[in-house]
């Protein structure tokens, strides 16, 4: 009798657990996918008025507006040009620093790492305002270079922390064995260190691109009205265009993120992103 009661209790507990898991999955799916479904629906409807359950009609006119509006096309072009430049600049600046943090012990190493992380833990609008004052002095307001520098600031943590962890994970014994076999320092770095650290570097580059591509506050402050990117143009779209145009533009804004996350998914799920914040 007691065994049957325990069995029933276990079955009831298992059922409750499954119900909670199912409710959690439904909640997360609604929270994550719901806005995307709303955007997709809005992007193809003529109008959708409350309390109608179905849209008043379907159309592709909103997509034609995007392809025909020069200001919208220019913003897309700016984002697709500036963001890769930011990633390239971040790689040139940060990868040597990441290697140094991974391979060398020097005074202030942990202080630099923690300070770099802490600088990104606070709202940046005050920093952007101070930078804008400096930009006026250097005549960088409303310039592509000024926007690149602003976006570059937010990528430093990704292109330093994550590749540093990737470099640190490469066994020193492999490099020493290659050197003993007669390989030069450059060949050891190219064929062993860089190749094994490449997944972490790829994740850092993806995260840097996504940050640069989505950065709006600083870009708006120092770039507008001369330089518009896709995120900064969203302000104008929300205020001055129909909601359907903003929905189409939002979908276009998410496409690069989805593609890059898909490319780097194996390494992100494999722990490369998490390892980047576990530097010893």
Image (tube, rainbow, N blue to C red):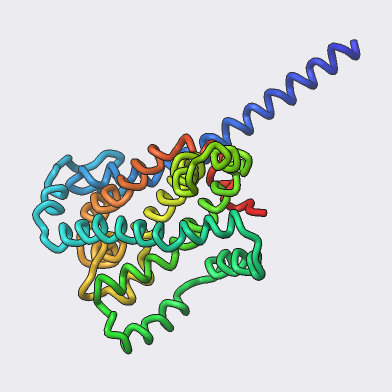
Query: Residue reaching furthest left?
Result: 68
Image quarter of residue 81: bottom left
Q: Is 21 on the left or on the right of 48, as rendered?
A: right
User: For the point 12% across and 53% down, which residue is it?
Assistant: 65
Q: Is 47 on the left or on the right of 116, as rendered?
A: left
Instruction: Residue 38: give x, y in percent of width and height.
Output: 33, 45
Q: Does residue 31 show up? A: no
Q: How many marks?
A: 0
Camera-side residue of 136 and 122: 136
State the quadrant of the C terminus: bottom right
Q: Is 4 on the left or on the right of 72, as rendered?
A: right
User: For the point 53% across and 55% down, which residue is it?
Assistant: 99
In the image, residue 84 above or below residue 258: below
Query: Residue reaching furthest bottom?
Result: 137
In the image, residue 62 above or below residue 220: above
Q: Is 70 on the left or on the right of 34, as rendered?
A: left
In the image, residue 28 above or below residue 131: above
User: For the point 44% across and 61% down, which residue is it?
Assistant: 155
Q: Does residue 73 show up? A: yes
State the quadrant of the N terminus: top right
Camera-side residue of 19 and 103: 103
Query: Residue reaching furthest right?
Result: 2
Instruction: Residue 125: give x, y in percent of width and height.
Output: 45, 75
Instruction: Residue 256: give x, y in percent of width and height.
Output: 31, 47
Instruction: Residue 214: give x, y in percent of width and height.
Output: 36, 58
Image quarter of residue 9: top right
User: For the point 68% across and 29% down, which residue is it?
Assistant: 17
Query: Residue reaching furthest front?
Result: 182
């Amino acid at each position: 009798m007691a065994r049957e009661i325990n069995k029933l209790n276990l079955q009831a507990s298992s059922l409750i657990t499954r119900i909670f898991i199912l409710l959690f999955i439904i909640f997360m799916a609604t929270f994550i996918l719901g806005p995307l479904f709303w955007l997709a629906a809005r992007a193809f409807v003529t109008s959708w008025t409350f309390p109608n359950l179905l849209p008043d009609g379907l159309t592709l006119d909103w997509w034609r507006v995007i392809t025909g509006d020069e200001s919208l096309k220019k913003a897309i072009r700016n984002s697709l040009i500036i963001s890769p430049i930011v990633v390239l600049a971040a790689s040139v600046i940060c990868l040597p620093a990441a290697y140094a943090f991974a391979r060398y012990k020097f005074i202030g190493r942990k202080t630099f790492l923690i300070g770099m992380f802490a600088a990104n833990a606070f709202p940046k609008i005050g920093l952007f305002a101070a930078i804008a004052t400096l930009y006026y002095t250097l005549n960088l307001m409303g310039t592509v270079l000024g926007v690149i520098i602003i976006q570059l600031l937010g990528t430093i943590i990704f292109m330093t922390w994550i590749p540093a962890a990737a470099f640190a994970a490469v066994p020193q014994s492999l490099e020493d064995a290659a050197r003993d076999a007669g390989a030069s320092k450059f060949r050891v770095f190219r064929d062993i260190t860089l190749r094994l650290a490449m997944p972490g570097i790829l994740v850092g580059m993806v995260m840097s691109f996504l940050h640069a591509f989505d950065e709006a506050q600083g870009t708006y402050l120092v770039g507008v009205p001369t330089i518009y990117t896709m995120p900064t143009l969203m302000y104008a779209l929300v205020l001055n265009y129909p909601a359907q145009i903003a929905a189409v533009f939002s979908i276009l804004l998410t496409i690069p993120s989805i593609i890059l996350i898909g490319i780097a998914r194996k390494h992100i799920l494999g722990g490369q992103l998490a390892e980047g914040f576990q530097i010893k």
